[in-house]
Amino acid sequence: MNEQFQQALSVIETLKRHGHEAYFVGGAVRDYLLQRPIGDIDIATSAHPQEVMSIFPKTVPVGIAHGTVMVIERGVSYEVTTFRKEGRYEDYRRPKDVTFVSSLYEDLQRRDFTMNAIAMNEHGDIIDPFGGTEALKQRIIETVGDAAERFNEDALRMMRALRFVSQLGFSLSTKTKQAIIQYGHLLQHIAVERIAVEFEKLLLGPFMSKAIDLLIETNLFCYLPELATKKKELAQLATYSIVPTHRTEAWARFAFVVHFHQKELKKWKLPNHFIRDILICLKALEHIRSLSDWTIDTLYEYGSYIPHIERIRAALDHDEPHVHLLLKQWEALPIHNRKELAINGNDLLILFERKAGPWLAEMIENIERAVLHREVENEKEKLKEWAVCNQRRENNC
Ligand code: ATP
Ligand code: MG
């Protein structure tokens, strides 16, 4: 067992001391067996949420209705969920009610894929009733039980299957793939926000190309917002192999390739501030590609977005990103934003003894460009002198 699990052992041991069963489950066990870095550790237990809350001093009731309590031990949080099976599924979505059950087996049975239905006890023994370890060995994604039934229960699982393809590079089992082809349309019943979470993970995965090819092959893309008419563009996206390092980069590259603008991004219900970031990247990409390269002006204008934009540019051009070099060039600029100018609007109002008006914004912009291009030093007196000369020049023509 690795250090993270060792640390989490105390949660399992405490639950057991109180007479309950408790196991590590889900993605952490899967990733541990794959020798990948593990994310959050989830624990399944026979204890009911109220019992979990009374046993541990620090807890947060994050999802009591679904049996989940967050336990915080030595600053690390663990999701502790009561063994459960899910109630009746309505409209192909996650059920509203769940029933607590007494056996680990039933809890594992309600999970989506065999590789995600493996438990590990406090000794590191693996409990694997559905053949998850074999699936990991074969690098296969396979539903627990009948694929058609499981996708009818919760259609989001089809998107999850493809995001795991992107993250792990695994293949879909024949039955799982066939069921996605047959029931892909059920994705229409799923909240866009839930789809977007999985799609984002797909865009960020090292095997994105493989997942996008499958999105196309299974026709699942037809049921993603605004993508039904974008088969050709998606196929293009699958040709890019650079793995994005950030969600802004992932979405912006995707949006650039499939020609998504604000309207389409809004359909994905992404947060407004995030859409704004993506749109800045899109504008910058158009701009830089139209100039064939970065310039002093574009470095200045896109400042903190440079790493994202450069990595997307490189991916699109099948080129190496020059992030480090560009950041050095950016650092060497005489100013990095307007606030760094040694003169402000007030200074100019006094200097020219004029009332504020459109002339002022224009003047500041001119000064900003002149400083940026080193036509004048960023020093108050020099800028005043330059502004007066500039004004005279403008008046003369
Ligand atoms: P990640 O490493 O990305 O967090 P994960 O496998 O832990 O991957 P989560 O979304 O955190 O994925 O879910 C935790 C576990 O809950 C899964 O491993 C799976 O067992 C189960 N699970 C999650 N979503 C579903 C679902 N829609 N249907 C069935 N089981 C699910
Ligand atoms: Mg997880």
Image (cartoon, rainbow, N blue to C red):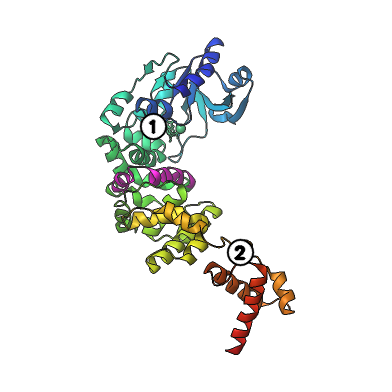
Identify the residue shown where x is 54% and y is 51%: 271
Quadrant assignment for the C terminus:
bottom right
The one nearer the camera, 125 or 387, is 387
- Residue numbers of the magenta segment: 193-215
Apparent side of residue 135 relative to residue 85 in the rendered image (left or right): left
Question: Is 213 placed above or below 334 here?
Answer: above
Say the numbered circle drawn on residue 112: 1
Q: Quadrant of residue 228?
A: bottom left
Q: Which amino acid is tagged 1? A: Asp
Quadrant assignment for the N terminus:
top left
Residue 141: x, y in percent?
31, 33
Apparent side of residue 393 relative to residue 267 in the rendered image (left or right): right
Q: Which amino acid is tagged 2? A: Arg
Identify the residue shown where x is 58% and y is 61%: 337
Residue 3: x, y in percent?
46, 22
The one nearer the camera, 221 or 248, is 248
Say the numbered circle drawn on residue 193: none
Residue 114: x, y in percent?
34, 28
- Note whether ligand 1 is within 8 Å of mark 1: yes
Q: Residues within 10 Å of mark 1 (few under 14, many from 20)?
A: many
Say the numbered circle drawn on residue 338: 2
Identify the residue shown where x is 52% and y is 14%: 13
* SS label for mark 2: helix
Q: CA distance from mark 2 to mark 1?
A: 52 Å
Q: Tell me if I can see residue 270 in this picture.
A: yes
User: Along the polypeptide, which appears first: circle 2 or circle 1?
Assistant: 1
